[in-house]
Image (cartoon, rainbow, N blue to C red):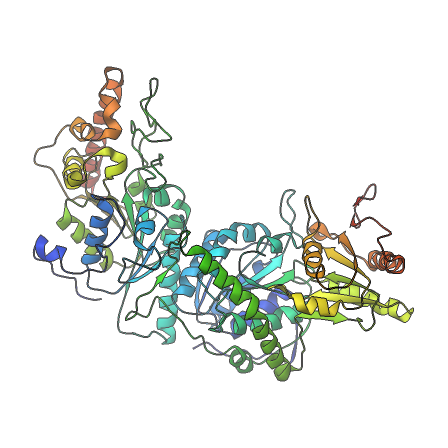
Amino acid sequence: MSEMKKIKNLKEFSTSADRFEGANLLCPGCAHSIIVREVLNATNDDLILSASTGCLEVCTAVYPYTSWDASWIHIGFENGSTAVAGAEAMYKALKRKGRLKQPDREPKFVSFAGDGASYDIGFQWISGCFERGHNIMHVVLDNEVYANTGGQRSSSTPIGGSTTTSPAGRVSYGEKQHKKDMLSIMAAHGAPYVAQVAPNKWKDMVKKIQHGFSVEGPVFINAMSACTTEWKFLPEDTIAISDLATDSLVFPLYEIIDGRKLNITYRPKNVIPVKDYLGAQGRFKHLFKPENKHVLDEWQARVDRDWEYLQRREEAGV
Amino acid sequence: MADKMELRDVEVWDGNMAASQALRQVQIDVVAAYPITPSTPIVENYGNYLANGYVDGEFIMVESEHAAMSGCIGASAAGGRVATATSSQGFALMVETLYQASGMRLPIILNVVNRALAAPLNVNGDHSDMYLGRDSGWIQLDAYNPQQAYDLNFIAFRVAEDHEVRLPCMVHQDGFLTSHTAQGVKTLDDDTAYNFVGDFKPMNDMLDLDHPVTHGVQTEEDWHFEHKARQHNDLMTKVLPKIQAAFNAFEKLTGRKYNIVETYNMEEAEVAVVCMGTSVETAIEVSNELRAEGKKVGVIGIRVLRPWPFEQIVEALKGVKAIGALDRSSPNGTFGMLYNELAGTLINCGEAKVLTNYVYGLGGRDLTKVHLREIYAELLANAEAGKPTTPMQQLIGVRGPKISFH
């Protein structure tokens, strides 16, 4: 195995590699580009990448340009995981047959996909890849909405979110379902490593990505990706919104090793109320009307309950 | 390195075994597959060769046919030899990815064991699935028996992997009628077979770590047309000469001769049926009998469905007065596919032809010699009259009142 990359500080980290170019068409303030750079910069190893159809894909490989200085493939909305799994299988086959051009190098295989391409349409493909144990990392850029098609709900959209297909209106408070718990589902596949990360906690993210690259088998990373366009906040506030998410425990940072051992990796010193996170985004604005108070209450109760549950799982150590 | 397998000069193989033996002999690097009747034994056999050391590639049993082709695309882009097999609903599920494979110019080989499409559910052979892929940018070769299923796989790899072509290729055979019917198949020894196809030569592979590449980019109105036009141009202009060259080389190696358009009893033929798959062999038999009776009837077998061989078909049909296009798929609202292709081809050939569409054999229904005799009798009457004497579209062998359309 190759040595883990040593990273001293944020300044060095942010300029340490440029396999994902700043030249792309993503919105100003989009967390996707921050996450992708953090993932790619976590390693010096060669990379074989795929992207599922989505914002990241359409904004970074518009012919005749590409923002990627690493081999990259896009097939469709649903099958980015299987594309990179196919490449990983070819790597194994050619290695065994002695036909690799650079036999002494061990590339990492990573698929990037949005929550739609992971929680919904691509779920079957990811599940298949994980069950078969491909040595790949699947990174979800989880912005909790179909942003590339203009803001429709996905099964990652949290309760009360107003989207174009779950709009808030006179008689509706928006999305009715709770966000799908993908981490538990993926951990239940027996994956050697699954983790939830956020771009504002970059050291935590790098540690988890490096852990993911160091294990043999499929790794699932769910990265919270704040979306200025659909969450409705100012482009300069991406990291501030991410801080609110992690400090309110709406988006807790934790990892599950070998499908069972859960570690909480970030405990906010001062846990802030969920409404502080919700109130900072236009998509939840309507929840602050008196008639929707029950949704705010449900939000807080659920976050409290989930945090309690995570801590108990961590304590139990099984 | 994989072990060699000793084969007899003639083995008794069904079409599935023949195809899987070819996949073994060309030493596929990655197979990603999902089972579906009647193509399942192709990948089962491959798994068996793997379990016994006769191949040493990677075998991924994925969770669907869509994933099978997705895995094949990723593997092929990574730079190695890739193949899989499917049928019917599985083929239908794959269709989205078929376009992606050809658009990325990846030389994947897909063995399609043709079968009807549901509903109603049916596991038997017809050509309905094959036509779902006809605009997908793949080369499509058609085998009529196990020998051809074996031989055409070698042709497929040689043509698809040619750097001037770089397009995926399907090899079709009829479900059960070919895939599960054992016949004597003349074999090639492992080295001869492998050398006919040769080593895989990657181009723009993702695993060349010093030269990263981007596959499957986004193009809109500014570039999409150019890419599709180039793909179409290469399919139309480069593929048939390459197939012909591969046929010639294969004949030199084995003595077995293939043509882009197969013609039987076409010397001074007045009428001909145009067909695909196992019905070609039945039609040859009937035309032999009718020739013995002094009737000038012939058979045209479509060996290459895509690219459609316009010139060869016009040439083959020179002097023929009446033609029957035999379609083994439900036309569902228009003429059969072969009829449409022939009509489009013949409209500019300068000869008046009477063209009739016969739809037969759906869901595995037999096409009998009696049926073919009736068809030839009608075509001969048409030829003599110089015009259609029967309805333009007829459904052969359907119970109940005769179904036909003018």
Measured as percent of width and height from the top left, residue B154 is found at 56, 73
Measured as percent of width and height from the top left, residue B106 is found at 46, 64
Residue at (33, 17) in percent of width and height: A170
Q: Nearer the viewer, residue B199 or A51?
A: A51
Measured as percent of width and height from the top left, residue A112 is found at 31, 51
Image quadrant assignment for residue B384: bottom right
Indicate the quadrant containing the N terminus of chain B: top left, top right, bottom left or bottom right.
Answer: bottom left
Residue at (9, 53) in percent of width and height: A10
Image quadrant assignment for residue A209: bottom left
Residue at (35, 34) in percent of width and height: A153
Residue B106 vs A33, above or below: the answer is below
Q: Nearer the viewer, residue B292 or B342?
A: B342
- In this view, the residue farthest toward the bottom is B252
Measured as percent of width and height from the top left, residue B140 is found at 59, 63
Q: Is residue A18 visible?
A: yes
Q: How many numbered tags mark residues here?
A: 0
